Amino acid sequence: MHPYESIRTEMLRRINDQSWPAGFTLPREEDLAEEFGVARGTIRRALASLSEAGLIERKRRAGTRVVDRRGHRSTLTIPIVRHEIEARGGQYGYRLICVDEAAASPLDKTLFEGAPLRHVRCLHLSDDKPFQLEDRLINLDAVPDAADETFDTISPNEWLVQRAPYSFIRTGLRAELAHQIDQDHLGLKAGAPVFVIERQTRFRDAPLTSVRLSNRADEFEIVTESGDLL
Amino acid sequence: MHPYESIRTEMLRRINDQSWPAGFTLPREEDLAEEFGVARGTIRRALASLSEAGLIERKRRAGTRVVDRRGHRSTLTIPIVRHEIEARGGQYGYRLICVDEAAASPLDKTLFEGAPLRHVRCLHLSDDKPFQLEDRLINLDAVPDAADETFDTISPNEWLVQRAPYSFIRTGLRAELAHQIDQDHLGLKAGAPVFVIERQTRFRDAPLTSVRLSNRADEFEIVTESGDLL
DNA sequence: AGCTTCAATATGTCTATACATATTAAGGGG
DNA sequence: CCCCTTAATATGTATAGACATATTGAAGCT
């Protein structure tokens, strides 16, 4: 147990037992350093950890305050299809469905402001069973190479990550009833629920790609465990 | 732009343009410090930032390596109902449905290994319209005070957070078809989809509470934007 | 009152140095 | 050949001092 860790634990105790109640402004770093008998840097290390965990908020000149959290702000990571499938012991498979077909996409094209687009629809399989349907638009102005790629062996997801760095991501999670294309490709009946992940990535204000990932609700769940401090 | 920030940007550039490809082991901190003409602490600050963002992995003695990410590992934060509702300009409302009624709960009681339980079911409303149904089990061994609380004015969520510190959280997100209780209380027809959040919290290996939050799929979406570094 | 200016202040960053410690790689014995 | 010991090494932590900078709150002006 390093000094900064035991200091953090003690601070956690004070927050939990309301010695430092929500909204309370804690002493200055220098005073804390004196109280705990360590250097200011060590105090900062402990405070940084609590700050990352969202338990305190720090502002220059204003000081450090205990966050008033009536609920928790847990963060979770969205798995990558291939990893998700392999983690369950399944055999990952990929199948291209169509490229640039006139078929209507559930995605919103207006985000790209008229830029030339590539439209790819493909399927991620687990043990040859449909697992996730991917419907994607790619901005050819921002990623010109995508015009020459057939995507018949590599998924646009993996292709893009290797080629196009992104600087901004927007992710949305929803529950929906299966669209027609979900029913067709995921083998679902009308009225079945699907878990939908929609994601848009940009690079320096230029929209790169927009994707809708739909999953069979009976086989898909996003799970995260966060064994916090303490 | 502080030194550590511009150093981080330069490192990002090298990762993106494959000067530092996936799997690559970067130079030691001391060498980097010499190259960039700063102290080792400044290099560490930049590396810590990249490490948090999940772009590099660091291990003692082994060095620092660029993570091989075929996809992205975006992290998102789950909103708190009340905040979610108020953020949309709605008026938050709370209504208790029942406590300790024999009614079957969709939750798994076996997690608590026979401990005495409190069962609470309640509703979170937006402008008097049902928004989220909460179904919760509380371990009375771990939180004895919960036996005396009626929960008729305060939601168990807020009550618990103020009283019982947690050290571990497990969260699951799913799409489901509305159960009977979802239909009854959220005003849904049979066959409607719901977005379900299930969460279990523990404190030092003792299970504290388990909750199922179901939301009308047509009104609920979890969204996060991460405007990362760069 | 309302507005601007300005100094006080707590956090943020940087440097330089020393020591701690996990982990790997090499060496030595069975 | 395998297991154990041991030393080398890159990251992790701690210290102490200096300076930077965002914000606040008060003083002064209109």
Image (tube, coloured by chain):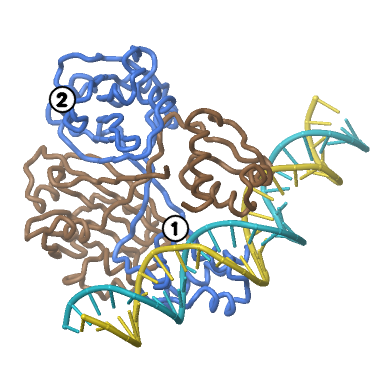
Chain colours: A blue, B brown, C cyan, D yellow
Q: Residue B149's quadrant in the figure?
A: bottom left
Above or below B128: residue A129? above
* Structural crowding at the residue carrying mark 1, measured as other residues with C-alpha within 10 Å and reported as few (<14), some (14–19) or many (≥20): few
Of the residues shown, which amino acid type is indicated by label 1? Glu
Residue B214 appears left or right of A16: left
Q: In the rendering, at what x and y percent does residue A55 appear?
A: 40, 64
Foreground pick, A146 / B82: A146
Above or below B154: residue A137? above
Q: Chain of mark 1?
A: A
Q: In the rendering, at what x and y percent does residue A1 appear?
A: 62, 63
Q: CA distance from mark 1 to mark 2?
A: 44 Å
Foreground pick, A20 / A87: A20
**Numbered disc in front, either 1 or 2:** 1
* Structural crowding at the residue carrying mark 2, measured as other residues with C-alpha within 10 Å and reported as few (<14), some (14–19) or many (≥20): few
Q: In the rendering, at what x and y percent does residue B176 appear?
A: 21, 40
Residue assigned mark 2? A189
Q: Chain of mark 2?
A: A
Which quadrant would the C terminus of chain B be assigned to in this image? Answer: top left
Element assignment for label 1: helix
Residue assigned mark 1? A52
Residue at the spot x=13%, y=54% of the render? Answer: B131
Residue A23 appears left or right of A135: right
Of the residues shown, which amino acid type is indicated by label 2? Lys
Residue B10 appears left or right of B104: right
